[in-house]
Amino acid sequence: MYRAGAGAASRISNLPDGARIPYHGDMSTPHELSGPNPPADPLALLARWIAEAGTLRVQPNPNAMVLATCDADGRPSARVVLCKDVTSEPGYLTFYTNYQSRKGRELQARGRAAAVFHWDALHRQARIEGPVVKAPSHESDAYFASRPWPSRIGAWASAQSQVTDSRAALERSLAAAAVRFGAPLPGSPEAEGLFTGTIPRPPHWGGYRLWAEAIELWVEGAARLHDRLLWTRRLSPSGETFHGEPWSVRRLQP
Ligand SMILES: Cc1cc2nc3c(=O)[nH]c(=O)nc-3n(C[C@H](O)[C@H](O)[C@H](O)COP(=O)(O)O)c2cc1C
């Protein structure tokens, strides 16, 4: 399992001593997708790629992914979110957001999403598609509680994706949320001290699980002869969760 935090990068191109960015542009260099025996568990490999991008500090947010959703009429939209967990067994990615945001409304309407990661310096891309369900509330509660208190105040202050009159109106909303929970105003001199009061998770904020029904891992190759492996499986709903059949894998032309 990948979990955000450990080894997360803070600066671009600040490689630790001895670290080497693997470059697969030379087709004679074997890598995990080039051989005849593909890895059996694509999500475990995805988790490793995210972790490696963190360890090698190739970009500030190695767990950033572009998440695409569709509205009820099939009109697509996309934005970046952070993948906070890859749970390779039974097989989903977790991200957190506002349930009433545009993406939240579109997930409500269609219940499916596609995500793409790109690690430019590592010459790797990963695409994931499948159904999306809300994470269990106890999981969202635990993650929310782990966030810095100013972020928790911010989750109450912002009706994400709604139009606002002004920046000042947003700041008033932040101040009102801070007063409501007895917290200092985030960013003020008093806020330097540790705030230990309780800030509950807003009902409109929490996690989603993107269940992997299809996952493509891509490694750049010379002469545009990239390696692309596509794993697919059937997912059957089982209550609030899914049962996944074994993966089958095929190689795609670049
Ligand atoms: C690096 C990065 C990470 C982000 N992570 C998140 C995230 O984890 N959750 C989230 O709701 N928005 C995140 N955002 C903001 C979203 O891209 C987006 O602006 C916001 O969720 C509203 O999207 P929507 O109106 O399409 O719902 C992130 C943006 C960037 C650039």
Image: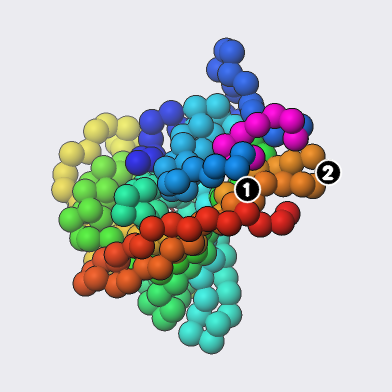
Residue carrying label 2: 223
Percent across and percent down for residue 247 are 43, 57
Percent across and percent down for residue 220 are 70, 42
Please provide the residue range marked out in magenta. 27-34
Q: Amino acid at mark 1?
A: Trp
Residue furthest top in the image: 17
Answer left or right for 207 relative to 67. Answer: left
Residue carrying label 1: 218
The structure residue drawn at horizontal position 64% and vertical position 51%, both measured from the top left corner, is 228
Percent across and percent down for residue 240 are 24, 69
The quadrant holding residue 27 is top right
Answer left or right for 180 relative to 153. Answer: left
Q: Element at badge 1?
A: strand
Q: Amino acid at mark 2?
A: Ala
The quadrant holding residue 187 is top left
The structure residue drawn at horizontal position 32% and vertical position 32%, both measured from the top left corner, is 192
Residue furthest bottom in the image: 73
5 is higher (above) or lower (below) than 166: above
Circle 1 packing at 10 Å, graded few (<14), some (14-19), many (20+), is many
Task: Tell me which numbered mark, 2 or 1, is placed earlier along the sequence.
Answer: 1
**Residue 33 colored magenta?**
yes
The quadrant holding residue 92 is bottom left
